[in-house]
Image (cartoon, rainbow, N blue to C red):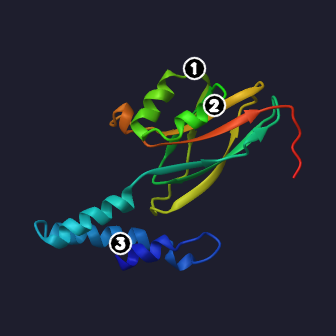
Amino acid sequence: YQLYSQGILYEKTRNQQNLLMKQEAADHCRKAIAAFPKSHGALQCSSLLENILAQSVRVKMETYIPVQARARILVEYANLDSVRFTVMRIPAGFGNEFSPLKDSLKLVTIATLKTEAEWNVKLKNPGDYQIHATEVVLPPLSPGRYMIVAKINDPTRKTFEQTFAFAFIQVTDLVLLH
């Protein structure tokens, strides 16, 4: 657990010594599970290993973007080789109804929306179990409100079990100054 805790502290610009701590923790867990498969420690190691190997994705982007302009999406991810992006037009007020839903209901709701654009993005996965980030270009969109969804490509999971992230945007010609 101590190696895992140190691995969480890794940041690309600082704490370079913690880069491989999660990898080392995973190796120790595998060895402990193999050596003592029916022990309480093996149970704890299994739980820790599940956390280390967990796939995750998060998206961030500007809320308002210009009409027919290319925008960037910041994608933060762990333990992934690719992500599938989908852009869907949404009605006004959709975000207020959508956000409080449970994830399984969110996925069902997403499936009912009309897709405007869809594409896959290959990601660098160095196998260090750390969170990495990259930027992805959003295709030009016409005016309106949209939801951007990033889903993990995992055909073994059922639709309502998939890991995903989303962001709401508005494509507009209005100029916003801070």
The residue sitting at 58% across, 71% down in the picture is 11
Mark 2 crowdedness (10 Å alpha carbons): few <14, some 14-19, many ≥20: few
> Which element carries disc 1, helix, strand or loop?
loop
Mark 1 or mark 3, whichever is nearer to me:
1
> What separation in Å lies between label 2 and label 1 (alpha carbons)?
17 Å
Which numbered disc, 2 or 1, marks the residue that appears first in the sequence?
A: 2
Name the residue tied to disc 1: 114
Which numbered disc, 1 or 3, marks the residue that appears first in the sequence?
A: 3
Where does the image place residue 55, in percent across and percent down from the top left?
A: 43, 51
User: Is any part of residue 123 visible from this angle?
Assistant: yes
The amino acid marked with disc number 1 is: Lys
| Res 25 label | 3
**Quarter of the view holding residue 36:** bottom left
> What separation in Å lies between label 3 and label 2 (alpha carbons)?
45 Å
Name the residue tied to disc 2: 93
The amino acid marked with disc number 2 is: Gly
Q: Is residue 22 above or below residue 105?
A: below
Q: Nearer the viewer, residue 63 or 52?
A: 63
- Asked whether, in this view, residue 28 is left or right of residue 60, the answer is left
Mark 3 or mark 2, whichever is nearer to me:
2
